[in-house]
């Protein structure tokens, strides 16, 4: 069964240069301001994107994900946001377990898993990030780290992975310009699929999309796309550029 290609743009608080400004200009904006979002939306709305890939400000087929959600439905949790608040704003996905949250904000595997459960129970899709540090890779622990991150989620959500997209993001490749080689990425994606088959179900292994993130750009996405177990991308820096459209269309 063919899995539908899935590409997410992970917009952060990074510096953003509108098309009218040169890189390095002092008038740069922080990404996420209204002007920066307008430019990105305009680029996507005007792009030639296969209707199977794509479907208000933003045209249908392009959905919006939050970069976090809390694991409780309501209560006094200053600074947090609930599943129902996200849904009320038209948000359909939550990106969870990004390494910046795991490392900078000390989110544990279990906390990420509890948020995944809350999101799925509330009807959001989940883009679940996992990935190893350079130290862990060099110690030969990549698969162990990734599968234990996934196991925490499986323990919390059980067997229904139909609304989960797994994003494999080696930490050493995020924002560094060091993309994993096609072999490195494929090896981990394959191991994740085997883990799904063994620990969740054959159906989950066959249908769950496993996307790659870590310095993906319009030049390196083509080779990665050819790998059997790479079903799309999670893109940080390059998602802010017009060439993001080339990444979205990498499989067409
Ligand atoms: C990310 O932040 O999830 C990411 C993959 O970033 P970049 O593409 O910039 O490496």
Image: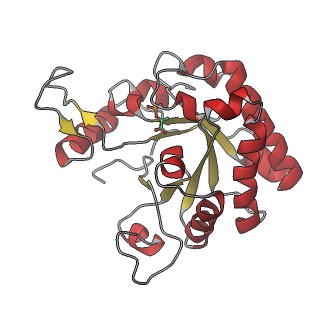
On the question of residue 110 being in view, the answer is yes
| Residue at the spot 61% in from the left edge and 35% down from the top edge | 133
The x and y percentages for residue 80 are 40, 69
Q: How is the image coloured?
A: secondary structure
Quarter of the figure with residue 185 = top right
Of all residues, the one furthest to the right in this rendering is 198
Q: How many marks?
A: 0
Q: Position of residue 14 (x, y in %)?
A: 30, 38
The residue depicted at 40 percent of the width and 77 percent of the height is: 77
The answer to whether residue 48 of the structure is visible from this angle is no
The residue positioned 73% from the left and 33% from the top of the image is 188
- Of all residues shown, which one is farthest toward the bottom? 75
Q: Quadrant of the N terminus?
A: top right
> Is 118 situated above or below 62?
below
Residue 141: x, y in percent? Answer: 76, 36
* Towards the viewer: 169 or 58: 169
Residue 209 quadrant: top right
Q: Quadrant of residue 121?
A: bottom right
Q: Residue at x 58, y 71 (%)?
A: 118
Left of 198 or right of it: where is 176? left
Residue 66: image location, x then y, percent: 42, 56
The answer to whether 13 appears left or right of 52 in the picture is left
- In the rendered image, which quarter contains the C terminus? top right
């Amino acid at each position: 069964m063919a899995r539908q290609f899935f590409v997410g743009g992970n917009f952060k608080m990074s510096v953003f240069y509108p098309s009218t400004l040169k890189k390095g200009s002092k008038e740069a904006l922080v990404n996420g301001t209204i002007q920066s979002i307008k430019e990105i939306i305009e680029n996507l709305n005007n792009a030639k994107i296969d209707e199977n890939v794509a479907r208000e400000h933003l045209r249908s087929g392009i959905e919006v994900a939050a970069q976090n959600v809390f694991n409780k439905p309501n209560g006094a949790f200053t600074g947090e946001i609930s599943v129902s608040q996200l849904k009320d704003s038209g948000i359909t996905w939550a990106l969870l377990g990004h390494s910046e949250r795991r490392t900078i904000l000390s989110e544990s595997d279990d906390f990420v898993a509890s948020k995944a459960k809350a999101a799925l129970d509330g009807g959001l899709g989940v883009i679940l990030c996992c990935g190893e540090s350079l130290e862990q890779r060099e110690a030969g622990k990549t698969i162990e780290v990734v599968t234990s991150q996934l196991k925490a989620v499986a323990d919390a959500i059980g067997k229904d992975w139909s609304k989960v997209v797994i994003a494999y993001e080696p930490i050493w490749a995020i924002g560094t310009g060091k993309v994993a080689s096609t072999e490195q990425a494929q090896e981990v994606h394959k191991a994740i699929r085997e883990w799904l088959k063994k620990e969740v179900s054959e159906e989950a292994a066959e249908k769950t999309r496993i996307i790659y993130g870590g310095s993906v750009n319009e030049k390196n996405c083509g080779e990665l796309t050819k790998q059997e177990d790479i079903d799309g991308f999670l893109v940080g820096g390059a998602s802010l550029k017009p060439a993001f459209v080339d990444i979205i269309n990498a499989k067409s």
